[in-house]
């Protein structure tokens, strides 16, 4: 039986950014596929609907309006057909598990140890800014070939791009309600171009083993490279989503473990449990929360709702990972729950290319941290706040330990 479309027009961007969980719990219960005017699109909130749309031949990837404004075209997350196939053939080879296993330890462990050495003897640290984000951006930055760009600059770039990408609020005419919210990212992209363009000039003439060099050359006829304007939108995707995801997953996993001291102790005693702890951390607070969209290629019925051709649906994977139909007590962090699949990395042919890489960065980062500081504790004098509805993670995590 086909139902009418639910319009949920009392949701604000502030609610979504600060604490989206009550909003999405309400949507899952009342209207799991609803039109949300402030986002200018339909929103899918249950695991079943998200997975169904992500894998359906009746939908294609599309970039959100704010995402298109941030990244430009063609960004790998928002294209289909031969262009998507080419972009994935460009980025995928370096991220295959067998390839990642070949170099991941040599890449990430020295980075993690270097950042640990800066604070492990001090007895306190704010781990998001001092460890989780720096390890994440440095690992990917070095893989891309951006060794000359400081970790602080890479962090600055992804934060500015994130604010732009999630600046999605629209009015009744579909116009952005905060157009000035794109200014910092525009400035960041100018800075990125000023730094990366000379590197690209060199890679065109002198290819090396960096990822961006491979993006330029791999699969191209002799003497030709991909145009830089073609790869920049996907580079911006990497400088946002791929830069922040491992770091925020590490941070969320640690926050979750701090809510379960017995489980934290288990993980410290048995490092083999770290991958399971990370998986639960990504389910509990998905780093990519609601940043992926699909568009219907024809009139289609989903979950009893008739969607006209051209309907844009935001896939709220963070909400799907809190679906009571799939998980018991989903708002609780618990590594003992059955290891059910989650949607933190999406589904279908647009699932995240860096699934394995991100998990390995998190694993090595937490292995090094918990081995160096096994008596790590959360500083209860400081609150832990999370931010974001498109991308989500803890904004800070103050910790202490006895030296």
Image (tube, rainbow, N blue to C red):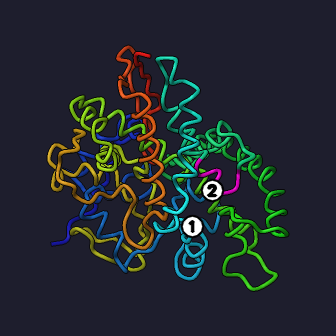
> Which sits in the foreground, 109 or 179?
109
Q: Secondary structure at mark 1?
A: helix
- Do the residues bearing badges 2 and 1 touch, measured as CB atoms within 8 Å? yes
Q: Which range of residues does the magenta coloring cover?
A: 139-146
- Percent coordinates x, y for residue 312 in the rendering: 43, 65
Horizontal arrangement in the rendering, residue 349 relative to residue 74 (left or right): left
Which picture quadrant has residue 399?
A: top left
- Percent coordinates x, y for residue 16 in the rendering: 39, 40
Mark 2 Cα shell of 10 Å, populated few (<14), some (14-19), many (≥20): some
Horizontal arrangement in the rendering, residue 38 relative to residue 26 (left or right): right
Q: CA–CA distance between discs 2 and 1?
A: 9 Å
The correct choice, above or below, for 347 with respect to 390 in the image is below
- Percent coordinates x, y for residue 246 in the rendering: 47, 47
Q: Secondary structure at mark 2?
A: helix
Tell me the residue that label 1 is attached to.
94
Horizontal arrangement in the rendering, residue 91 relative to residue 399 (left or right): right
Tell me the residue that label 2 is attached to.
143
Which picture quadrant has residue 392?
A: top left
- Percent coordinates x, y for residue 237 in the rendering: 58, 57
* Image point (56%, 52%), residue name: 106
Q: Earlier in the sequence, mark 2 or mark 1?
A: 1
Horizontal arrangement in the rendering, residue 175 relative to residue 265 (left or right): right
Q: Can residue 275 be seen?
A: yes
């Amino acid at each position: 039986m086909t139902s009418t479309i639910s319009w949920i027009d009392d949701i604000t961007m502030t609610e979504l950014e600060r604490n989206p969980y009550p909003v999405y719990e309400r949507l899952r219960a009342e209207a799991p596929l609803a039109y949300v005017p402030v986002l200018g699109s339909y929103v899918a909130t249950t695991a079943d609907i998200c997975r169904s749309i992500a894998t359906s031949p009746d939908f294609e990837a599309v970039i959100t309006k704010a995402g298109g404004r941030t990244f430009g075209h063609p960004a790998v997350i928002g294209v289909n057909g031969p262009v998507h196939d080419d972009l994935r053939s460009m980025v995928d080879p370096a991220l295959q598990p067998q390839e990642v296993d070949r170099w991941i330890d040599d890449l990430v462990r020295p980075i993690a140890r270097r950042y640990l050495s800066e604070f492990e003897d001090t007895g306190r640290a704010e781990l998001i800014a001092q460890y989780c984000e720096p390890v994440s951006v440095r690992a990917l930055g070095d893989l891309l070939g951006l060794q000359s760009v400081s970790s602080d600059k890479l962090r600055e770039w992804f934060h500015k791009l994130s604010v732009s990408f999630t600046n999605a609020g629209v009015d009744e005419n579909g116009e952005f309600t905060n157009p000035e919210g794109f200014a910092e990212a525009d400035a960041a992209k100018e800075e990125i171009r000023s730094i990366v363009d000379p590197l690209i000039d060199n890679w065109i003439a002198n290819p090396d083993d960096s990822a961006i060099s491979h993006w330029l050359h791999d699969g191209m006829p002799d003497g030709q490279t991909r145009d830089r304007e073609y790869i920049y939108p996907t580079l911006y995707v990497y400088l946002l989503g791929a830069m922040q995801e491992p770091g925020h997953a590490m941070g969320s996993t640690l926050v979750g473990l701090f809510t379960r001291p017995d489980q934290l102790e288990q993980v410290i005693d048995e490092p083999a449990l770290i991958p399971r702890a990370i998986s639960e951390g990504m389910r509990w607070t998905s780093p990519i929360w609601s940043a992926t969209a699909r568009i219907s290629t024809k009139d289609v019925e989903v979950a009893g709702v008739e969607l006209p051709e051209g309907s844009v649906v935001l896939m709220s994977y963070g909400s799907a990972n809190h679906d009571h139909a799939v998980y018991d007590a989903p708002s609780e962090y618990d590594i003992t729950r059955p290891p059910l699949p989650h949607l933190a990395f999406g589904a279908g042919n647009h699932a995240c290319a860096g699934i394995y890489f991100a998990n390995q960065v998190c694993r090595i980062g937490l292995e090094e941290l918990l081995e160096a500081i096994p008596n790590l504790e959360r500083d209860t004098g400081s609150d832990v706040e999370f931010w974001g509805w498109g991308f989500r993670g803890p904004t800070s995590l103050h910790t202490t330990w006895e030296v």
